[in-house]
Each structure stands twice: as structure tokens, then as C-alpha cells.
Amino acid sequence: MSRRSVFPWTMLGLGYVFLYGPIVSLIVYSFNASRLVTVWAGFSTHWYVELWRNQAIRDAALMSLRIAALAATGSLVLGTAAGVVLSRYRRFPARALFSGAIAVPLVLPEVIMGLSLLLLFVGLEGAFGWPEGRGVLTIVIAHITLGMAYVAVVVQARLHAFDRSVEEAALDLGARPWKVFAVITLPLIAPALAAGWLLAFSLSLDDLIMTSFVSGPASTTLPMVIFSSVRLGVSPQVNALATVLILLVTIAAVIAGRLMARSPQGQAS
Amino acid sequence: MSSKSWGRRAVIAAPYLWLGLFALVPLAIVLKISLAESVLGIPPYGPLIDMSGGTPTWVGTLENYQRLISDSLYARAYLSSILYAAGTTGLCLLLGYPMAYAIARAPKAWRVTLLMMVILPFWTSFLLRVYAWIGLLKGNGFINNALVWLGLVGEPLPLLNNSFSVFVGLVYGYLPFMVLPLYAQLEKLDPGLLEAAADLGSRPWRAFLSVTLPLSLPGIAAGSLLVFIPAVGEFVIPELLGGPDTLMIGKVLWDEFFNNRDWPAASAVAVALLALLALPMALIRRHIAEEPS
């Protein structure tokens, strides 16, 4: 038994080194005094000060946070509706088309999503005068389209996991469907909703490709700033920024993971 | 009863309309623009139907597609995208399978934590994780410095801006997509089957090949599709880790759009990429529809 297990466990260990090594290196070199990212010249928090003074990065970060909050909230509303439809409504016209459409943002390469949405926005503006130019609105729409698909998957999985009979009992006892949803279904799927919101938020915060296609001159997001600076080469400021983001995202991910792991069965027992 | 049906209709209609307008209609528009002529102007594409003469005349063109065939750049980008994605899928399987196996065989209390540790990097910015590899793989980067210091190599190896670094980035970016479905499949596997095989005198490797591997095929299929599909259309990794000769279809699309400002050509590339992915996407869609968890 033990001889058999050595190989998978070694690979698992190597896999973790592979997954976390680069992230650790980002953090370590963000405290490097030298401008040359990979030559160690002593501990320094110099780059964090520089980062804080960088107006372009601060503006872009605020822009990204605003967009992510809007996109995550929109994704949550539409994604929850889609998840409920997929798991509870078995029969309605063109159901197959619906479940196909929800999978589109999950599997479509982002370059195609970005290009196709841009062409749509340009076409709509030409025909109806809306949306006027491109900016926060078009980015939020693009991010909602991506985020709602992920929220729908999380919500659908959660709805599958718990017993429908509770909802049916309430309906039998004369409760209105909306009341059943608000009093029974919603509390049961609340952890999935929170996890879905966080997931949509982090997807939006990180998105570069779709955003580049549908953004306007006054809507530069954080990934766009990072991308253009990284293209010019490594910079310790980007390392400092990465460290701050990694810290925030890790906290969010741990919260989301806890919420998703809490099973409805576990709460009942 | 009527309030139920109205509420029900609204719940169905909202995501339906949204997805129709922002996921399906845009694809139809891409198809349309791919048939248009590239012009200088805003927007930089011509109409498909000319109404100026009073009677509608078809002025669309297949020129963009003809260029995809005649200019070998596109064919090479197409082919090398497939090779990169297929190679990445194979490498992810080689590394991901033992990882998923180890997690599935770990004590039950550890499994969630071990799995979380695979997923956690996925939450961190993709762009920054790719960026991290530049610092590691550079000529005077961490890995080369370590190799030279250890005396393993005389001078730094060319690790960055070639196909090696593109593969490293792709495997790094998509490994979790392989581990998750494999783990889900291996975790369901009844250990009693392996014990039965051992009791009947089967060696561990033979038991693995004739019991575990066949039973985990659905997980292998799902994981391979989940890695292959995004890898084919990847842009950030070839852009940041690749060299001047790294050709990938996602990068070609990006360059057509942002550098050449040729929207019809970019659309034709998108349609070609969609055609390539149609089969894998149809297959994975069945997985998503059938196994929501």
C-alpha cells in the first residue's frame, strides 16, 4: 500500500510547488530593494510607497472595484434566476436553447466574447444610439454576461443538493410561490449566492481581454494598466500590486470556499 | 394561479433575454461582419446589402475567408494553437492525474483542504500569475540564477519567449481544470474494487490499468475538454511568455483587431476558431448540462 502511494503523493507535492512557487516569488520580490526584480538587494517596502503614489494605478483600481461591484450584483440577480430556471423549471419553450445559451460564456474563448460584444455595441449604437460610446456601462454588461453563467452553475448545483420536498410542502400548505422562494429557497441557497457574488466579483476584477475590447478612453481598468506595464518588462511596482491583490483575493476565496463547503445537509443535522 | 405564471415568466424571461441579446446575437453579428468588406472609417466595415440603388444588392464578400486560406500565417497559427492546446492537455493529464488520485485517496478530513489548495491560485489574477513566470524564467531570472549557482549549467538557458515558456504558462494556468473533474470521478470510485483485484492476485499497476483507469475515463474526458478549449483560444500567455515566432489563433485575432484595425478579418478568424471548437464545446456542454455539480 505505502509503496504504491509514494508516487501520487510526490506528484501532489510537486504540483503544489508548481502552483504556488510563482505566487510566492511575486510576493518575495515585491519586498526587494533593487529595481532589477530578480536580483536581491535587501528588504524594502519602497515599492509599496511608489505604488501608493501612482495615481494611474489608483484610479484604475477604483474603476475596477466599481465595475466589479456592479457586475457581481447584476450577475447575482440574473445568474440566480437562470440557476432556478435550470434546476426547477423542467418544461418551457426552447429549454434546450436556454441551457445552451448559459453555457456559451463558460466555454467561448474570451477573444471571441470580447470581439462579438464590441460588434454588438457598435451595431446597437449605429441603429438605436445606445449605448453611447463605450465605457463603464459596456464593460459591466460584458462582465455580467460572463459572471451570470458562473453564478447559475453554482446556484444550480446548490439547488440540486437539497430536498425539494420542503418547498413542495410549503406549496401544499398554501404558500405563494414567491413566499416559498423568499422564506425557504433563498435562505437555503444563501451560501451559494454569496460564493457566486464573490466569484463574479473576482472574475470581473481580473478580466483583461473582454474589457480591452469593450472599454472606452475614460474607462481604463486595473488589468489593462498591469498589462501595458508588464508588456514593457517586469517592474517591482507590479509585484507590490500583485501582493496586495493576492492578499485580498485569498481572503475572499477562503470565505467563498467556506460558504460553498457548508452543505445544506450539514445544517440540517 | 396567474400570479405564479407571471412570476415564472419573468424569472425565465430576464436571463433568457439577456443571454439572447449579449451572448447569442453577438455571435450572429460576428458571422455577419466576417462577410463584410474592410473599409477606412468608423465603424471600419462595409454593409452586406447596398440599398443606394433602390433595389437591395448583395455586396458582401468571402474575401476574408479566402485570405484565411491563402495566407499561410493563419493556417500555421491554427495548427500551432491545436498543437499547443493538445500538448498542454497531455501534460496537464500527466501531472493532474496523480494529483487528483492522491487527493481522492487522502483521509476524508483532508480532501476538501487539499482540493481547495488546487483551486486557490485560480482565484488569483490570471494575468499576474502569468507575469510571475517572466521573473522566474528570464535570462537572469530565479531559475537560471539557481541553475548557474548550483553549477548545473555554465550560462543561463533560454527559458523565456519560446515554446517552452508558453507550455509552462498554459499548463500552469489550466492545471486546476484537469484536477477537479478527475478528482470528482476518482473520489466516487469504490476502493473495494481495487481490493478485489489485489485479492485475486493482480499487481497494483495492473489493477490501476484495468480498474481505476477505465473507470476514470469520464473524468479524463471532461478534464481534457476543460483544458483544451480555453488553451486553444488563449491570448495572454502567448503574448507575455511567447516569442516573436509564437503563433496562436487568439493572438492573431487580437492583432487583426487592435493592430491592423481590420474588424472583418478579426471576425473571420473568430468564426474559424468557433468552427474548430464547435465539437469540443458541444461535448463539454453535455457534461455541464448533465452534471451541474
Image (spheres, coloured by chain):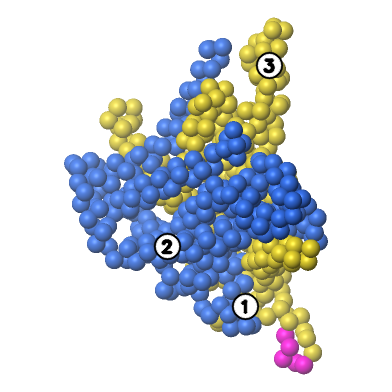
Chain colours: A blue, B yellow
Can you tell which mark lies on residue A64?
2
- Judge depth for marks 1 and 3 and give the one in front: 3
The crowding category of the residue bearing disc 2, from other C-alpha atoms within 10 Å (few below 14, some 14 to 19, many at least 20), is many
Q: Which residue is at the front of the view, A251 or A266? A: A266
Question: Spatial distance from mark 1 to mark 2, Cα to Cα?
Answer: 25 Å
The kind of residue tagged 1 is Leu
Residue at 55% across, 32% down: B96
Callout count: 3
Q: Is residue B156 above or below residue B132?
A: above
Expressed as whole percent of the image width and height from the top left, the position of residue B285 reads: 70, 48
Based on the picture, tell me whether residue B51 belongs to the magenta stretch. yes
Q: Is residue A53 above or below residue A8?
A: below
Side of A254 relative to A267 (left or right): left
Residue at the disc numbered 1: A124
Instruction: Tell me, yes or no, if residue B262 can be seen here.
Output: yes
Which stretch is magenta? Answer: B50-54
Question: Spatial distance from mark 3 to mark 2, Cα to Cα?
Answer: 51 Å
**Element under disc 2:** helix
Mark closer to the chain start, 1 or 2: 2
Can you tell which mark lies on residue A55?
none
Instruction: Tell me, yes or no, if residue B71 can be seen here.
Output: no
Residue at the disc numbered 3: B192
Q: Which residue is at the front of the view, A23 or B34? A: A23
For disc 2, the chain is A
Residue at 33% across, 62% down: A57
Q: Are marks 1 and 2 in contact (CB under 8 Å)?
A: no
